[in-house]
Image (cartoon, rainbow, N blue to C red):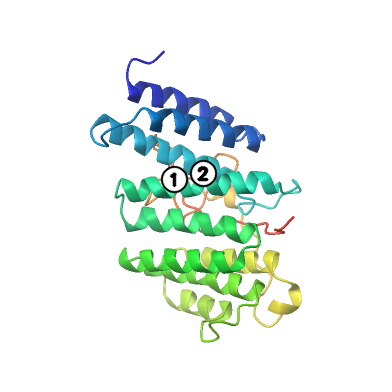
Amino acid sequence: MADTLAGLAGQLETQVKALRGAGDDAALLAAARDAADQIEHGCGARDGDEREVLMMVQRWTFNAAADCWPGWSVSDKPINQDNLLAARELAERSLRLVRTLELGPLREATGVWMVGAFDLALGRYEEAISMFREAREHYVVASAPGLVLLTGGYVAIARQVGKDQASPGGEDLDQICTRIAAGGFEDGHEWIAQLRTVAGRVCPAEQFVEWVEPAKPIDFRAAGEMMGFAEFIIGPRFAPTRWFARDDGDGDYRRPNSFSISLSFNST
C-alpha cells in the first residue's frame, strides 16, 4: 500500500499501462476510470503533490481513451459502441483536467480533438464538427498553423460525411490539402496522406471521387519515435507518428499526425 497519494497514483498508472495493448478495451477503460475515481476522491486542494497526481490522471485517462479509438490503424476488429462511449467519457474527463490544471492551448486542443474523434466514430457528425472547430481555434491561439490546417481537414471530412449544409462557405478537403502542400510543413506529405485516408474510410467513394486520391502507403511503424509537443500517449500498438502527442510521463512520446485511419464507423 502506497504511503502517499503520489505513490498510489504511480501504482495505479502502472496497472493501467499493463492493460494497454492487451486487446481488452473494456478492461482497460474500466481500470482507467476506477483508478481516476480513486485518486480524485483523495484530492483536496489542487497544488503541490496533488497537482502532480492529477496530471498523472489526465495522462492515463487520455491514453486509455486514445488506445480505444478505432481510427489509428486498419483493423478487422469489430467496433464496440459501448467501448466507444466509455472511451469518449474518459477523453472528456482528461480534457476537464487539462482545463483545470491550465496546461495550455496545445494540450487543450489535443483533448478537444480526441473528444471530436470519438464523436466522428459514433456518427455524431454535428458534434464532431463543433469539437474539431474548437480544437482548431485552440491551435490558432497556440500559433500552430500546420495543426490548424490539419484540424480543418477533419472539419471538412465531418462536414462531408455528415452532409452539413449549414456552412457552405467552408473549405473542402481538396483545398485544405492544397494549402498544406503549399505550406512547406515538415510533415505536410504525411498530413495529406492521413486526411485522404480518413476521407476514403469515412465517406462514400462517390462523395470524394473528384478530390481524394488513393493515399501512398506509409510504413508508419518504421517512422520512429517522435517527441510529442503535448506529451500525450497513443499507445504501443499504434503507429508512431507526429501530430497529437501522447503522454506516458516517461519520455515514451509519439505524435499521430500521419496515422492510417480505419473509419468504418457506426458499426472499436
CA gap between label 1 and label 2 equals 6 Å
Percent position of residue 267, x then y = 74, 55
- The residue sitting at 32% across, 47% down in the picture is 100
Contact, mark 1 vs mark 2 (Cβ under 8 Å): yes
Quadrant housing residue 212: bottom right
Q: Is residue 79 depicted above or below 211 in this figure? A: above
- Is 253 in front, or is 82? 82
Percent position of residue 155, x then y = 53, 71
Q: Is residue 266 left or right of residue 257?
A: right
- The residue sitting at 27% across, 30% down in the picture is 49
Label 1, residues with CA under 10 Å away: few <14, some 14-19, many ≥20: many
User: Could you tell me which secondary element the residue under label 1 belongs to?
Assistant: helix
Which quarter of the figure is the N terminus placed in?
Answer: top left
Q: Is residue 123 left or right of residue 107?
A: right
Read off the residue under disc 1: 94
- The residue sitting at 58% across, 33% down in the picture is 30
Label 2, residues with CA under 10 Å away: few <14, some 14-19, many ≥20: many
User: Could you tell me which secondary element the residue under label 2 belongs to?
Assistant: helix
Residue extending farthest to the bottom is: 169
Mark number, residue 124? none
Percent position of residue 222, x then y = 57, 48
Residue extending farthest to the top is: 1
Task: Kindly identify the amino acid type of the residue bearing the numbered disc 2.
Answer: Leu
- The residue sitting at 52% across, 35% down in the picture is 33
Task: Kindly identify the amino acid type of the residue bearing the numbered disc 1.
Answer: Ser
Q: Is residue 98 left or right of residue 223?
A: left
Q: Is residue 54 left or right of residue 268?
A: left
Q: Is residue 62 depicted above or below 41 in this figure? A: below
Q: Is residue 41 visible?
A: yes
Mark number, residue 90? 2
